[in-house]
Image (cartoon, rainbow, N blue to C red):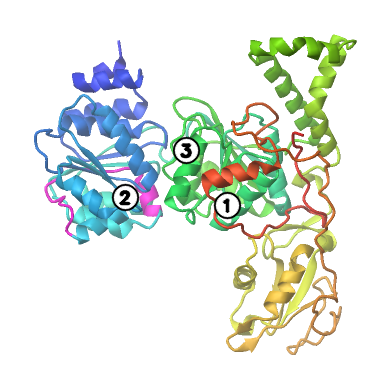
Amino acid sequence: MNKFEQLGLSESLLRAIIDLGFENPTEVQEKAIPLLLEQDTDLVALAQTGTGKTAAFGFPVIQKIDANNRNTQALILSPTRELCLQITNEIKNYSKYEKGINVVAVYGGASITDQARDIKRGAQVIVATPGRMQDMINRGLVNISQINYCILDEADEMLNMGFYEDIVNILSTTPDEKNTWLFSATMPAEVSRIAKQFMHNPIEITVGAKNSGSATVSHEFYLVNARDRYEALKRLADANPDIFSVVFCRTKRDTQQVAEKLIEDGYNAAALHGDLSQAQRDSVMKSFRGRQIQMLVATDVAARGIDVDNITHVVNYQLPDEIETYNHRSGRTGRAGKLGTSIVIVTKSEIRKISAIERIIKQKFEEKTIPSGIEICEIQLLHLANKIKDTEVDHEIDNYLPAINSVLEGLSKEELIKKMVSVEFNRFINYYKKTRDLSSQSSGSERRDDRDGAPRESNNGGAVRYFVNIGSRDNFDWMSLKDYLKETLDLGRDDVFKVDVKEGFSFFNTDPEHSDKVMEVLNNVQLEGRRINVEISKNDGGGRRDHNGRSSGGGFSGGRSSGGGGFRGERSSAPRSGGFGPRTERSSAPREGGFGGRSESRSSSAAPRREGGFSERAPRRSESSSDTPRERRPRKS
């Protein structure tokens, strides 16, 4: 007996449920569906992403609306276009045996006149994003003054994205006597304010503890130096050969750069962020759902609404600014009762955030160390052996066996196995035997700079220190100057460090590869009509200057450098280390075998770029701790 039959659903809905393959309702469905069918009530449901909330409100709203009345009776608000379309498709699937029910999706990036025409033809259910819905209300293209049900899905996400005013305005145009159903993963203050303002004695149901994480997701963190963050990401990918993941970055720029570097290093990756056109976003998501992309690098905003089954890992390349957002990130994995892993790559300055997240999700993190090269080689070796064992034999190869046997004649079984495995394994062992330990704890010579928290090697670790003629009298402190330098120079969060602000001047550090850019850009910038002057300092930050910039200890290089004076990290023109053989053309078919998420060859970057339509390449920076070019991952020759 299907357990959905016990929830009071109609025969037509039960038929659709059987077609969809649903057998057992989730906890939020068990709690919400009977309640909403039996009562006309407002509801606040707190449940994590991926717990079946769409069906929890979708089945009751379909059963309660009047299919013979073509006026709009239900409005469902969701944070993103992707989630809007997903909900629309699911509602249509649920109502496939209900005659006369029409569902219309309303979202930005599509023709507003077409959407208005579809509504005018008769749409009992509208699924909308807040921005486009408010636009249609302002233009008089939609009438929601007589609706019976208003559902806010992912309410905390919508408010976190800045839709508070839109939601308030939209709800203000709906009748007071309607039922409002609010579904949310967390209950921040703004969600509570919406509930108090627009809901009447709502019933509250909670799946798990409030704001808690999913029990099917395990949480791990890896402590690394800030400059090793990207190398750590690659090792974690190599240590999980079957990884199918979403990698979260804070900014669009970091998202694009990380994706491009992964592609260049041979991984099946793509970027998803707000600078992509809607067609590009759709293409990236299609490739991700088809598993042609194994590492989707995304911003929080772009990833909202992603509903892809069997994601094995969520990787927090950078922690979110709002700790509550972590819950939404980790909710992308461990869905439908399957197990998933949420990984955090964290620096010493961010370690305190782990405890804060633990308090919110009510789960503990397991601290782990980045796998060594030898450990990764062992994992990959066993993965390859299992792949060979599980490979189905295509008997079309039988015609070629005599020639193959002739070539391999004289080799024992043991020799043959060694040679087969070595074809791939040698590349990994040759790459990883040269690499160092990335574990932050192993570097005893490190110190933390308390002003920006970024771990750096003692004696600046080869970093370049600069003197610049702006300081506190220009209304800068160390944080605002660091932000100003990052924005002016178009550098990443960790590229400017050891910022030391005095009254009339300041010091700061970058890695050597940014030196030319710093000198060229800043020496051509004016701040409120005054030309900025930057010079390479010879001291470690201990020397002092008077307000005119004259050295009183430690000294600095005389005169403005124009390409000579001072140490610069020149870009090497030598081939990248590793020597992994000639490039080969990418096959038109998706790659199956091999190690980890690697593409067939370096030219793999072309395929995701065509499919995902990446925007123009951003400047790439090395995250390596040395001045040598970034090492490549082994490739298939």
- Helix or strand or loop: what does disc 3 sit on? helix
Asked if one can make out residue 511 in the rendered structure from this viewpoint, the answer is: no
Region in magenta: 140-160
The image shows residue 626, relative to residue 363, as above or below, that is below
Mark number for residue 107?
2
Task: Residue at the far left: name it.
Answer: 68
Mark number for residue 255?
1
Residue kind at label 3, given as amino acid type: Lys
Question: Quadrant of the rendered structure where residue 209 is?
Answer: top left
Of the numbered discs 3 and 1, the one sitting upstream in the chain is 1
Q: CA distance from mark 3 to mark 1?
A: 19 Å
- Helix or strand or loop: what does disc 1 sit on? helix
Residue kind at label 1, given as amino acid type: Thr
Residue kind at label 2, given as amino acid type: Tyr
Mark 1 packing: few (<14 Cα in 10 Å), some, or many (20+)? many
The image shows residue 585, relative to residue 216, as above or below, that is below
Residue 488 pos. (x, y %): 62, 72
Asked if one can make out residue 95 in the rendered structure from this viewpoint, the answer is: yes
Nearest the viewer among 354 and 25 is: 25
Badge nearest the viewer, 3 or 1: 3
- Helix or strand or loop: what does disc 2 sit on? loop
Left or right of 158 in this view: 617? right
- For label 3, the residue is 286
Q: Is residue 147 magenta?
A: yes
Residue 528 pos. (x, y %): 57, 86
Of the numbered discs 1 and 2, the one sitting upstream in the chain is 2
